[in-house]
Image (cartoon, grey):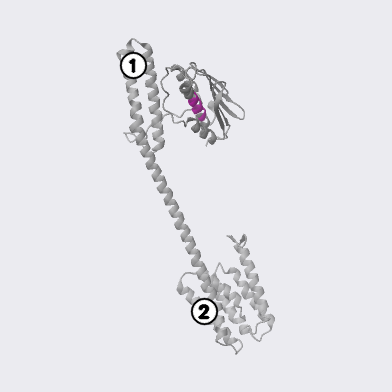
Amino acid sequence: MTGWRGWSVRRQDALLTALVVVIGVADTWIKPSNGLLTGQPTAVAAVTSGLVGSVLWWRRRSPGVVAAVIMVGYVITFTPVALAVAMYTVGEAYRRIRTLVRFGVAGCAAGVLVLWAGPPDWDLRAAAFTLAFILGPLVVGYAVAIRRDLAIEAQATIDAMERERHLLVERAQVGERARIARELHDVVAHRVGNIVLTAGALKVGPEARGAPAVARAAELIRDEGHQALEELREVLGVLTPGRRGRQNRPAATAPQPDASQLDKLVERSARFGRPATLRIDGHPETLPAPVQRAIHRIVQEGLTNAAKHAPGASVGVVVECRVDGVEVQVTNGHPAGGDRYVDAPPLPPSGGNGLIGLAERVALLDGKITAGPYDGGYRIDAFIPHRPAAP
């Protein structure tokens, strides 16, 4: 505990005790009454007053005992400052009204004894002042303690309400994620499932028997649909981590993409008639998993954007592992038929968030990414520094 500009409690008590001792010793030389020691040598009263004041050093450890000792010393040598501090400590330490009343009565009795042992010319005003000097600190100490207790209770209530608010927010988020998962399953999974079924039927149908190219295209569409469903199930597993399968088992999740799957990305692009070249310098498969996922997503986004916006253009993928990090470049040239083929089908719907998501992913890894026109085409350039451990 600290206070008084960072002082520790023990230093505070030491300073307070020293001040009370000094005031008590000095007071014996100027006050007309020294309690039962009135008429005795002043040096004796001064030493006794100092000893009584020094008892305050233990006031926090045993406030009741210290107050009783100081009351006795108050009667012997009249130490009002020491008694006031002791009564304040009692009021701050105890909460039972009966205990406080007992100490108040005992303090008043000590005050009456001091008045009786002192000069005979005391009056009601002096008696009222003495009793107020005894009972006042007791009441103030009790009020300070109650205020501190109320502040602690209020802070505890605020903390509890804050925790409850966080729980409610988490519960609402879980419910919203579950709702989104249901929407995805009801809409997207249904549509993709129909595509997969249609492609499967086309592959074995009469149209594909005499046309191997149609069969291959149907097989590609079917494989891509299966992959999309697996990734969709992975997203649903993130949105609803408690979701379980029909046999009360955790839902299966697709393996996380990593740098070892880059050649499959390029191969899949070639199978769809979008050839691309891949050059890898180093061993990106040894990098932390988050870095490998970021590399995979960058290449995937670059190939997808090239297919949508620059059909027929050459695409080059370069992954270079350097000493300070890994650099990924995906570059495509100008579309083969101008800005776009005249008879090309319309672009697939896109939210335009692919590059934004990549930028956020790379930023979480303390990396940088740039994307923009380059030599008549487009280039995505990302650099991710080596991290000592995966987050």
Residue in the image at 62% along x and 81% along y: 77
Q: Residue furthest front?
A: 342
Residue 304 is situated, as x and y percent measured from the top left of the image, at 47, 24
Q: Of the residues tagged 2 and 1, which is closer to the observer?
A: 1
243 shown above or below 260: below
> How far apart are the alpha carbons under marks 2 and 1?
103 Å
Please tell me whether the stretch drawn in magenta is mainly helix, strand or loop. helix
Occupied quadrant, residue 126? bottom right
The residue wearing badge 1 is 203
Q: Amino acid at mark 1?
A: Lys
Q: Which mark is residue 106?
A: 2
Q: Residue furthest left?
A: 206
Q: Residues within 10 Å of mark 2 (few under 14, many from 20)?
A: some
Magenta segment, which residues?
A: 294-302
Occupied quadrant, residue 69? bottom right
Q: Amino acid at mark 2?
A: Ala
Tell whether 182 sits left or right of 373: left
Q: Closer to the camera, 78 or 176?
A: 176
Check if residue 300 falls in the magenta segment: yes
Q: Residues within 10 Å of mark 1 (few under 14, many from 20)?
A: many
Q: Which mark is residue 255?
A: none
Q: Is residue 230 visible?
A: yes
262 shown above or below 44: above
- Judged from the image, the secondary structure of the residue bearing numbered disc 1 is helix
For the N terminus, the image quarter is bottom right
